[in-house]
Image: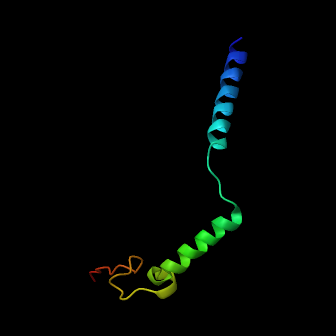
Amino acid sequence: MDIMAANLQQQRAIVEQLRREAGISRLPVSEACSVMMKYISEHENDDCLLNGFSSQKVNPFREKSTCQIL
């Protein structure tokens, strides 16, 4: 009986998750792509991967200088 109760509980959890997912509002792919393209084109001036950094000090990925004692 414990196996059946556990299985029933698992199935209820799955059904509840499916109900939550069914309630999510969705967009057509074409509309979502156009929204993403608009966002990208509006923010491309701020994209460091496209434009680079204004100086090395601003670059968080620069190699850190190390102090070596000889």
Is the N terminus in the top left, top right, bottom left or bottom right quadrant? top right
Instruction: Please say if 20 is above or below 1.
Output: below
Residue 40 placement: quadrant: bottom right
Q: Position of residue 2 (x, y in %)?
A: 68, 14
Is the C terminus in the top left, top right, bottom left or bottom right quadrant? bottom left
Observer-nearest of 68 and 21: 21
Q: Position of residue 9 (x, y in %)?
A: 65, 23
Number of marks in picture: 0
Instruction: Please say if 25 is above or below 54.
Output: above
Color style of the picture: rainbow
Instruction: Please say if 15 is above or below 33.
Output: above
Q: Residue at x 53, y 73 (%)?
A: 39
Q: Residue at x 29, y 81 (%)?
A: 68
Residue 34 placement: quadrant: bottom right
Q: Position of residue 43 (x, y in %)?
A: 48, 78
Q: Residue at x 34, y 81 (%)?
A: 58
